[in-house]
Amino acid sequence: MLFRHGEPLRALYVVKTGSVKTCAPGMNAEEQVLGFYLPGEPIGLGGIAQHCHSRTARVLETSAICEIPYLPLTQLATTLPALQRQLYHLLSRELNQQSEMLLLLGRKHAAERLATFLTDLSQRFGRRGLSATEFTLSMSRHDISNYLGLAVETISRLFSRFQADGLLQVDRKQIKILNSVALKRLSGAPVTPPPRRHRSHQQS
Amino acid sequence: MLFRHGEPLRALYVVKTGSVKTCAPGMNAEEQVLGFYLPGEPIGLGGIAQHCHSRTARVLETSAICEIPYLPLTQLATTLPALQRQLYHLLSRELNQQSEMLLLLGRKHAAERLATFLTDLSQRFGRRGLSATEFTLSMSRHDISNYLGLAVETISRLFSRFQADGLLQVDRKQIKILNSVALKRLSGAPVTPPPRRHRSHQQS
DNA sequence: CGCGGTTTTGAGTTCTATCAATAATTGTGG
DNA sequence: CCACAATTATTGATAGAACTCAAAACCGCG
């Protein structure tokens, strides 16, 4: 564990290799997964103001983490406007990512959520020079389900379905995206909004 | 409308009287409601880094809004560390509020969501010296449902149910909280986690 | 008073959670 | 290294929560 919710903030962190998840204490025992962090991504921004961590950060696998001591950073920031701006920028990026999650949790159904999750991961891997179509999930199905607000079984079923539909090739934690276009379309607004016809006896 | 998503950020705003909602463009035409702002609460923080608004802000009723020009503010902040810190603090508060919403949308069912929403409003009114038990909702059922990730009909039914259960007294937009304790308990982790028994023929 | 909009209520359907059981994988000690 | 236990993942059956469609009730307003 990198740090725990509530601890005094001694440093910020950047993932060098491996991956990290951040969690907040949920309602009933189980904590809520709030984000996954891949190489190059900064962790702990949310605690800057309170001088204590707002999340708990756990590594998902053997990882190399770069530690940025907090005090020197803020002191430097007071004299370096560019650094100051960069910190704002990172904070604000976090905020916008969370807004995306609000949209996902509030308006998307299960398949859209998983598709969004996978496309997002894909893009982030791609941005780091890694393969955008073939990667391994460092987090468990359980973590994914928690993050996406679904049941583990739903995630499992969706992986099976996506594979059956030729969107993915899934082998345990190894993912290969076969049809990124369809996946992306599925993740956002489907061109044809699910034309659900019930009351089918009322057809004209 | 106060400002629109994407516009250059000219000022931050603080609600003096009335109320405001912020929205982001959703997937299918309809935009997603991301927050409601009551008197005393600051709007527009999310855009600080990009120098442009990340949300659209719409007033919900006749309101008095205080405008804080952006440039002077940031310039002042570079020389006033206390102001700088205050800005971080507000940004970070926004972040934590959103985390709460992630929890709500990801793990709570409909009744818990509405109960959370009402207790939150109640507390915020109370903090401003207004009645915490009796207030009027400035937003439509539709806005509430959008914000909470539910259907309008569900909101309506829940208001009816809460009233039938003696939790609230609802008259159109007038709300009177009759049992704030029960409401609060409902909003978080119920003491007895919903003991749903299906397969009831298997009872011992 | 009649009209558009919002809210409420009702009926039926769908999606996803839950329960249950099995299979696959990982970890552990002999 | 293998057998066993323990976790994690998959698959199936069922139930329940919430959505959709539909229509009525209610409200504000010209």
Image (cartoon, coloured by chain):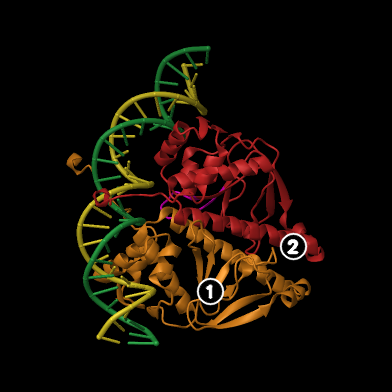
Chain colours: A red, B orange, C yellow, D green
Along the line of sight, the residue nearer the viewer: B62 or B184: B62
Secondary structure mainly formed by the magenta segment: loop
Q: Secondary structure at mark 2?
A: helix
Q: Picture coordinates of residue A40 (x, y %)?
A: 69, 45
Q: Which x, y percent locates residue B64?
A: 55, 84
- Give how far across and how far down residue A171 sits, in percent: 51, 28
How much space separates mark 1 and mark 2, taking CA atoms?
28 Å
Residue that numbered label 2 is attached to: A85
B108 or B142, nearer to the observer: B142
Q: Quadrant of the N terminus of chain B?
A: bottom right
Q: Is residue A55 above or below residue B22?
A: above
Which range of residues does the magenta coloring cover? A22-32
The percent coordinates of residue B24 (x first, y second) are 54, 63
Residue D11 sits above or below residue B49 on the image: above
Amino acid type shown at disc 2: Arg
Q: Nearer the viewer, residue B10 or A77?
A: B10
Q: Residue at x 62, y 56 (%)?
A: A94
Query: Badge 1: few (under 14), some or many (20 or more) residues near its Cα, within 10 Å?
Result: some
- Residue B188, disc: none
Please name the amino acid that badge 1 sits on.
Answer: Arg
- Looking at the image, the residue that sits furthest to the front is A204
Question: Quick check: marks 1 and 2 in contact, CB under 8 Å?
Answer: no
Q: Quadrant of residue B123?
A: bottom left
Q: Which mark is residue B58?
A: 1
Q: In front: mark 1 or mark 2? A: 1
Q: Residue at x 68, y 43 (%)?
A: A127
Residue B20 in sight: yes
In the image: residue A197, left or right of residue A76: left
